[in-house]
Amino acid sequence: MIRKILCTATLLLAFFATGVGRATDVVAQAAVTRMNTVSRGTPAYEDVRQFILKHSKASQHASLDNVRTWPVSFTIASKTSMSAGDFVEAQDISGPPTPLPPNGNIGDTITISACSRGISESWSYAWGLTSTGGYGWVLQDYHYQVVNKCKDAIRQ
């Protein structure tokens, strides 16, 4: 299985002054973005496929219903918000967990993309309030496009 792993982190500092001559509180938040590619035929691939089927409508995953139209691989990008202390512990992360996380925090996102046989698809999810009133992964955006070459779809 070919895996491309990219782990980047952005540390954001916010300063809130409580007045002149008073102490300043420092609140540190980190956002970790991880990317990974999973290949067809692996358990991780099936986990990602099941995640998409569970968290989207039938019209938003037509290529995943028939084994003959399944993409060769999925590329997953996940963004997780955490405190600076948790960030220090998370530096050893090797890629998005599979199966994909059943829960998250407000601000967490997962984007899954695939392109093969002239079909480019992408699904973008965010952790938030679902239509049933609970919290869960909510599909924010879905793209389906017929392309001449997959590398053309990646550039868009």
Image (tube, rainbow, N blue to C red):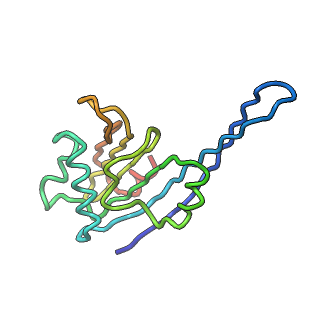
Q: Quadrant of residue 35?
A: bottom left
As drawn, which residue projects farthest toward the front?
Answer: 22
Vertical arrangement, residue 113 with respect to residue 1, above or below: above
Residue ID at (35%, 36%):
140
Residue ID at (36%, 57%):
150
Residue 90, image x, y percentages: 53, 61
Q: Nearer the viewer, residue 131 or 110?
A: 131
Along the horizontal axis of the image, is 27 left or right of 61?
right
Along the horizontal axis of the image, is 16 left or right of 115?
right
Q: Nearer the viewer, residue 69 or 151?
A: 69
The N terminus lies in quadrant: bottom left
Residue ID at (27%, 52%):
119
As drawn, which residue projects farthest toward the top?
Answer: 19
Vertical arrangement, residue 129 with respect to residue 113, above or below: above
As drawn, which residue projects farthest toward the bottom?
Answer: 1
Residue 102, image x, y percentages: 31, 50
Q: Quadrant of residue 57?
A: top left
